[in-house]
């Protein structure tokens, strides 16, 4: 028997599962990261050019909007799959929504 002052060690329980990450969720996450980095780089370069950004930055913004919309669609498709882990799909969904809000904010500030 244990004395009244001793601590009892608890075993760590490891749960094994045959679930894996879906490729669409991972791709949504990757698109979200690429779009966010592209937007941040575009804003920083535009700031360094004192607002005299070339038309290429507008094309980058348009492509980022398309990629973000595709990323949202992929994340929703990945979340609807039953036997997969939804971690990357959830992160990709949040990232792509944040990207769209960032693009909307840029467009609103430019008007």
Image (cartoon, rainbow, N blue to C red):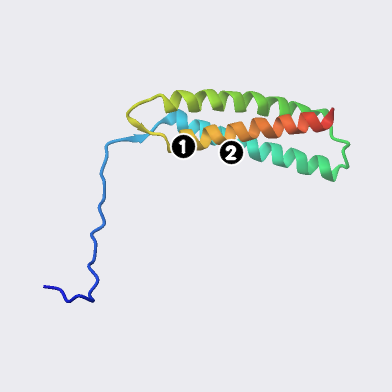
- Which residue is pictured at 48% across the width and 35% down the height? 90
Quadrant of the rendering where the C terminus is positioned: top right
Judged from this view, the residue extending furthest toward the front is 4
- Which residue is pictured at 70% across the width and 37% down the height? 39
SS at circle 1: helix
Image vertical order of residue 18 relative to residue 71, above or below: below
Toward the viewer: 15 or 33?
A: 15
Residue 93 in the image: state x and y as whole percent.
53, 32
Number of numbered discs: 2
Q: Residues within 10 Å of mark 2 (few under 14, many from 20)?
A: some
Toward the viewer: 50 or 13?
A: 13
Judged from this view, the residue extending furthest toward the left is 1
Q: Which residue is mark 2?
A: 33
Using the rendered view, name the quadrant where residue 78 is placed: top left
Q: CA distance from mark 1 to mark 2?
A: 12 Å
Please say if the residues under marks 1 and 2 sit with CB atoms less than 8 Å apart. Answer: no
Comparing labels 1 and 2, the label whose residue is closer to the camera: 1
Residue 69 in the image: state x and y as whole percent.
60, 24
Residue 81 in the image: state x and y as whole percent.
38, 25
Q: Which residue is mark 1?
A: 88
Residue 8 in the image: state x and y as whole percent.
22, 68
Toward the viewer: 49 or 76?
A: 76
Using the rendered view, name the quadrant where residue 84 is placed: top left
Q: Which label's residue is closer to the chain start, 1 or 2?
A: 2
């Amino acid at each position: 028997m244990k004395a009244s002052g001793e601590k009892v060690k608890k075993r760590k329980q490891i749960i094994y599962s045959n679930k894996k990450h879906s490729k669409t969720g991972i791709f949504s996450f990757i698109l979200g990261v690429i779009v966010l980095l592209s937007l941040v780089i575009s804003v920083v370069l535009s700031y360094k050019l004192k607002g005299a950004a070339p038309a290429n930055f507008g094309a980058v913004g348009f492509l980022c909007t398309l990629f973000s919309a595709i990323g949202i669609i992929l994340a929703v498709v990945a979340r609807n799959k039953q036997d997969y882990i939804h971690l990357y799909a959830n992160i990709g969904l949040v990232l792509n929504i944040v990207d769209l809000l960032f693009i909307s904010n840029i467009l609103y500030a430019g008007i």
